[in-house]
Image (spheres, grey):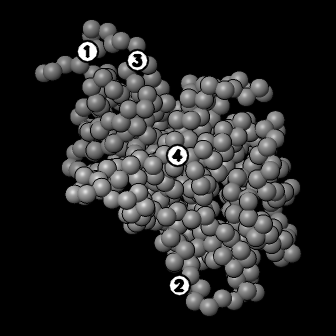
Amino acid sequence: MATARAPRFLLLFCRSCRSLRAPQSRAYAALVPGVSQVDNRSDFLGKKPHRKHPGILHLPHVQLPQALADAAQLLLFERPMRSIEKQVQALTNYLWSRHLPVEPEELQRRAASLEKKFLEKQDSTPTEEKLREAVLHALRKTTYHWQELSYNEELSLIYMAARLDGGFAAVSRAFHEIQARIPEFRPQTLMDFGSGTGSVAWAAHSTWGQSLREYVCVDSSAAMLALAEKLLKAVVQNQGSPVSQVSFSDNSSLCHPRVQFDVVVSAYALSELPSRADRTEVVQNLWRKTSHFLVLVENGTKAGHRLLMDARNLVLGEKEKSPLDLRPSFVFAPNKKPKEETFSMVILARGSPKEANRWPRITQPVLKRPRHVHCHLCCPDGHMQHAVVTARRHGRDLYRCARVSSWGDLLPVMAPSEFPPPSPAEEPSES
């Protein structure tokens, strides 16, 4: 959960029981019959309290680097604009309410359907010209008119004021997921497609520090690239920038798939592409340039979620393998976060999913009720399940972990196929 309290700040989103003490009958009690069971193969809590169990992944608080916030404020003061607050709110509302552009095939289908309806209603056959005018008029009234945003210097500054903190928060949450689950991963190179203000590079540095030696920011807007570079130079002039080796480039750098990066990011950029074919080409190129993780972030709307699901299915079903990397793909982290910074994300990784934690993810706010908890889970096999966790059936540890978990966290349960069958003496008793 992330919320912006001021232009420069943002919020992103019982006692410890030291070991699993649930009897074997409870340990094997299914959350949802045939779907998932308690992970009792290891002491997953260790010496941690329940509120810090290893499935906790949400970020309670994130703040823009002070140097970056000061640099952004300075650029706004240097270029005063009338009614900046209203323009920021208008752009925010517009970006949030945007739909995907209608594909030509869909337009043709709608036009054919309208033409059929008009002909059925008319007593006499209208002329071709009148029929065409009527169809076009109806299409204009019922079809969303998607327009490409052209960022000049002024609009880029407004975008920075509106989205610098929210973009930083959303990407920080995605990077935190990788760091928390694979702490030994130390990326050296990063590419940001649709880099905008450069918030991804700052979020990456806040997560991995000096491990990163190369940042490549790619954007089709010269004004956005210039603004991101100004932000970086302003920080350097004030106190020296901790983010070094940053290069800025237009989209032509995507034409060289042989160069791979440890982390590739596209944050709020797929929604700026005019067609499904363009998105397909970009996602394929981004995946070919990915050495370890591809992080995709979009608005937490139906349109944003649809974009990410299309990209996910494209990568997972991709038959064409990179000549330099034959490792398979898998979903490392799907997520959809609630207000205040609402976003959807998917993290795609190379390698085997067995290397990642296979606990299911909580996909909706946890409903806490007396002596039981409702959790909506996305299981490792991709199925969605509704689980009701109780201390009586599942043990106190799992019950307390469920109560302190949030939307986007992992719940320490496993698929029954990963368990050895219980002995007859360990079978659950109905008495």
The amino acid type found where label 4 is placed reads Leu
The amino acid type found where label 3 is placed reads Ser
Residue 168, position as x, y percentages in the image:
62, 62
Q: Looking at the image, tell me whether mark 4 or mark 1 is earlier in sequence order.
A: 4
The residue carrying mark 1 is 427
The residue carrying mark 4 is 308
- Find numbered disc 3 in the image and state the secondary structure of the residue it sits on: helix
Residue 261, position as x, y percentages in the image:
76, 41
- Which disc is residue 417 wearing? 3
The amino acid type found where label 1 is placed reads Glu
Which label sits in the foreground, 3 or 4? Answer: 4
Say which residue appears at 75% left-offset and 49% top-offset: 191
In which image quadrant can residue 294 be found? top right
* Residue 235 visible in the picture: no
Residue 126, position as x, y percentages in the image:
33, 59
Q: Looking at the image, tell me whether mark 1 or mark 3 is earlier in sequence order.
A: 3
In which image quadrant can residue 156 be found? bottom right
Which label sits in the foreground, 2 or 3? Answer: 2
Q: Are circles 3 and 4 on residues that touch, CB within 8 Å?
A: no
| Local crowd size for mark 2, using a 10 Å CA cut-off: few (<14), some (14–19), many (≥20) | few
Say which residue appears at 67% left-offset and 49% top-offset: 265
* Residue 169 visible in the picture: yes
Which label sits in the foreground, 4 or 1? Answer: 4
Residue 231, position as x, y percentages in the image:
77, 71
The residue carrying mark 2 is 86
User: Does residue 2 appear to the left or right of 25 in the view shown?
Assistant: right
How far is mark 3 from mark 4, CA to CA?
Answer: 29 Å
How far is mark 1 from mark 3, CA to CA?
Answer: 16 Å
- Which disc is residue 52 wearing? none
Counting the numbered discs, the total is: 4
Say which residue appears at 39% left-offset and 63% top-offset: 130
Q: Are circles 4 and 1 on residues that touch, CB within 8 Å?
A: no
